[in-house]
Image (spheres, helix red, strand yellow):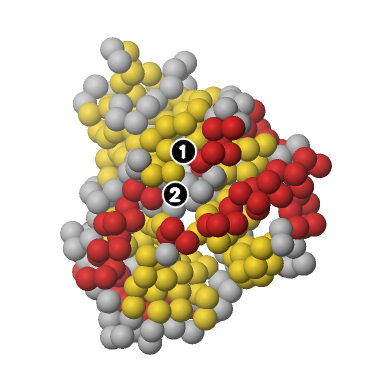
Amino acid sequence: MKKTPLYQKHVDLNAKIIDFGGFLMPVQYEGVNAEHEAVRTAAGVFDVSHMGEFLLEGEGALETIQAITTNNAEKLVDGKAQYTCMPNEQGGIIDDLLVYKMADHKYLLVVNASNIDKDFSWIEKNLKGDAKLTNVSDSYALLAVQGPKATFALQSLTDEDLDAISFYSFKEGKFAGVDNVIISATGYTGAGGFELYIPAAKASEVWDAVIESGNKVDLKPCGLAARDTLRLEMGYCLYGNDITDETSPLEAGLGWITKFQKGDFTAKDIIQKQKEEGVKRKLVGFELVDKGVARQGYDIVDANENKIGFITSGTMSPSMKKAIAMGYVATDFSSEGTEVGIKVRNKILKAKTVKFPFLK
């Protein structure tokens, strides 16, 4: 099992530790609801150093990205980031990722922890021209400081104007006395805030500085459980649950990051055909009408109890105080307000389809 550079910090804080993507990670400290509430109303800090980082350099770097991802990276300028995904040859999703343009011919790709080896191998196999790929994951620690008071909590730690870093933009500079920190506004909670890419050897001192500076807004350390409830309220996909090698970007509602006009990319013809003919299933949101919680893997059924889909993620929303879920259903059942049943053990609970995000 791998450990992040901050593992001992989590142990010292009595966090509950679990295996996630091959890493020992904190799932919660004080409790999911308290940590979730802190992020929605003030600020919380997550150790997400398990994420993978690859450096892609050379004159073939952009050509490589354009060939292996669905979004149009040509639109990126220095200091901007982009959400995208990598399709496989069948049109499924190898991974969803962030692309940061550091400079001309130099990009940082941020991938999911459980997919680091798979992604590296795929990209390396598809390099164009003189493009060079380096796995720099062990060089970085990554903190996500999220919440409406994150800017106030962090501003005293840097001379960079945090208010000037717009959504999906980043700056590289000094933070908490540490050089070469990437300060990025690409959150996964819908609550605002920043990600801090820190030289791994400096992770502990930056963590301590964030906790201390965050005291003025009651910032809390937060675990993966709160991260999951926060992203689910926003309808954000989690790789391995809502998107996989078997799901296409269009089925998953990721048409907005699928740019057919940019030129050729992996499985473009397959995905374009889906667009023209329409997909047979869609990822949609559900609110439960009956009491209960829908969990990953539960069947979704029609009025005659015929299976029409399955749940990919589900929870009791701490903000909304109601059960919400995401899942794939046959397209005929995907429009807003459609009533369906969800099989929870030997009961069928009533639910209705709703638009993302759940938390308006």
Bin the neighbour count of mark 2 within 10 Å (Cα to Cα): few under 14, some 14-19, many 20 and up: many
Q: Which residue type does callout 2 highlight? A: His
| Front-lying residue, 221 or 291 | 221
Q: Which residue is mark 2?
A: 50
Q: In the picture provided, is 248 more to the left or to the right than 105?
A: left
Q: Is residue 72 above or below residue 135?
A: below
Q: Which residue type does callout 1 highlight? A: Met
Q: In the picture provided, is 159 more to the left or to the right than 49?
A: right
- Residue in view at x 78 percent, y 52 percent: 152
Q: Could you tell me which secondary element the residue under label 1 belongs to?
A: strand
- Residue in view at x 61 percent, y 69 percent: 180
Q: Could you tell me which secondary element the residue under label 2 belongs to?
A: loop
Quadrant location of the N terminus? top left
Q: Position of residue 198 (x, y in %)?
A: 57, 59
Q: CA distance from mark 2 to mark 1?
A: 8 Å
Residue 274 in sight from this viewpoint: no
The outermost residue toward the top is: 346
User: Any mark on residue 339, and which?
Assistant: none
Q: In the picture provided, is 107 more to the left or to the right than 31?
A: left
The outermost residue toward the left is: 90
Q: Circles 2 and 1: CB distance less than 8 Å? A: yes
Q: Which residue is mark 1?
A: 25
Bin the neighbour count of mark 1 within 10 Å (Cα to Cα): few under 14, some 14-19, many 20 and up: many
The image quadrant that residue 116 belongs to is bottom left
Residue 169 in sight from this viewpoint: yes
- Residue in view at x 47 percent, y 61 percent: 139
The image quadrant that residue 294 belongs to is top left
Q: Position of residue 104 (x, y in %)?
A: 49, 84
- Residue in view at x 66 percent, y 63 percent: 178
Q: Position of residue 195 (x, y in %)?
A: 59, 56
